[in-house]
Image (cartoon, rainbow, N blue to C red):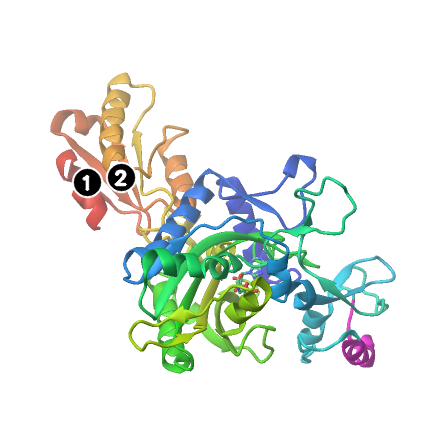
Amino acid sequence: MADSPEKNLMDKIISLAKRRGFIYQGSEIYGGLAGVYDFGPHGVELLNNLKREWWDECVSTRENWYGLDSGMFKNPRVWEASGHTKGFSDPLAECRKCNTRIRVDKALEAIGLMADEKMGEEEINTLFDAHRKEIVCEKCGAHDFSPVKKFNLLVKSNLGDFTSDGDEPVYLPGEACQGIYLNFKNVVDSMHPKIPFGIAQIGKAFRNEISPRNFIFRCREFEQADTQLFIKPNENKEAYEVLKQERMNWYLSLGIRKENLRFKQHENLAFYAKDAWDIEYCYPWGFDELEGIHDRSDYDLTQHQKFSGNDLRFNDSETGEKYIPWILETSMGMGRLFLAVLTDAYKEDEMNGEIRTYLKFNYKIAPVKVAVFPLLKNKPELVAKAREVYLQIKKVIPQALWDDNGNIGKRYRRQDEIGTPYCVTIDFDTLDNQTVTVRDRDTGTQQRIPIGDLEDYLKTN
Ligand code: GAP
């Protein structure tokens, strides 16, 4: 991507995200911490809007789907049962010249080869050795790498480790969904669902990613929005197709352009999956994974039943049978969705003879729905009227913003970059006839609207 139009676009998005308070580098004043980002004031509003949309889609508007918020720390046995302590690793090699670490599977993929997740260290070293000359260190250009090691991605903590002997680490969650499996029996016992039923959760995940990259795309700390659909054994095929389609339609409902979304089936299956498809988005560097949709069969509950010694079978009152349900999972990285909507909304055009940048967010996800300002900030009668209108709007549209910084042109440019669909200006005519101008972000056109009609206008346009 070096100095390409794609890199240029990525740089512009990163710069706008910082300039306008969407995303900051984590621990920036200390030089940052690789793979960790913070959401700023407009970022957290956008993030919360996206979470609300997801929650409405996956919980609130459905019957037989239940929400959950489980603790991050879990009994260490959980990660043994899930397979993460053994199977959750990426192949790593280190450049002998500059010590840059690379993910060998990604480096092989870039030259058209596939390193299967199930390959052991010896096998992957053989493949890597045969293609060493084709793999270049992207930092220093050398071809000189250490042997490949499988590197476990779980992040350890010392919670409750008062002896410091380090024997029993407690892990941060490598995937958020384990909290759902652990509460499967609790939800069944307290909610008495009929099968099929779903459990949904948004939770943090942590991975010791070897090479965090592409801004918030691959991080070491991130959030996953997961649903687990519990179904009867062998009833996976049709339900899987329905789930895939529902998820794709949801992305379209956020206003993401259809041509920027596609399905891709995994050739290389994770250790828990029977079938796996990704929904990919066309990021500035090309199509890449936004969400994983996995057919996990009975893997998870069988493992937890075995390791915990608890009966995790579902008592099907309709058939009188007891069985371990199969699971269909959807798992979306919130940061990846955030970057997708930011990329999709990013636009440049020419307005009044100047190049302007704006974010064409769908109204329902826009972090600021409307900005209100007085035409001039040194005219107390205009400011007083503008405050009155602003406070009236804010009662019904909480994501309304007061802005009186700089001249009107600067305010429009700032609000365009935040993606604010409407700007309302209070001018001298307002004092005479109780009308305001409403400026549309996408076209720049302005309309005079009676103050009394403003709420309906903003909500329905
Ligand atoms: N429970 C299944 C699971 O964790 P995954 O494919 O490893 O599956 C699911 O992750 C989703 O989580 C991905 O599609 C992606 O959106 C997000 N994700 C995974 N690793 C990530 C990372 N390092 N940084 C940001 N998001 C990540």
Residue hosting label 1: 455
Earlier sequence position, callout 1 versus callout 2: 2
Residue ID at (45%, 71%): 327
What is the magenta segment's predominant secondary structure? helix
Q: Left of 236 or right of it: where is 84? A: right
Q: Which residues are magenta?
A: 122-136
Q: Is residue 254 visible?
A: no
Residue 397: mark in rendering? 2
Along the line of sight, which residue is nearer the eye, 81 or 106?
Answer: 81
> Mark 1–mark 2 contact, CB under 8 Å?
yes
User: What amino acid is at disc 1?
Assistant: Glu
Q: Does the magenta-highlighted stretch encompass residue 330?
A: no
Residue 68 rendering spot, x and y as whole percentages: 41, 53
Which of discs 1 and 2 lies nearer the camera? The answer is 2
Image: 105 above or below 80: below
Image quarter where ligand 1 lies: bottom right
Along the line of sight, which residue is nearer the eye, 307 or 398?
Answer: 307
Residue 325 rendering spot, x and y as whole percentages: 43, 72
Residue ID at (61%, 42%): 26
Local secondary structure at mark 1: helix
**Res 144 quadrant in image:** bottom right
Q: Quadrant of the N terminus?
A: bottom right
Q: Is residue 324 visible?
A: yes
State whether label 1 is within 8 Å of ligand 1. Answer: no
Residue 436: mark in rendering? none
Residue 96 rendering spot, x and y as whole percentages: 87, 62
User: What amino acid is at disc 2?
Assistant: Ile
Local secondary structure at mark 2: loop
**Res 133 quadrant in image:** bottom right
Q: Does the magenta-highlighted stretch encompass residue 127?
A: yes
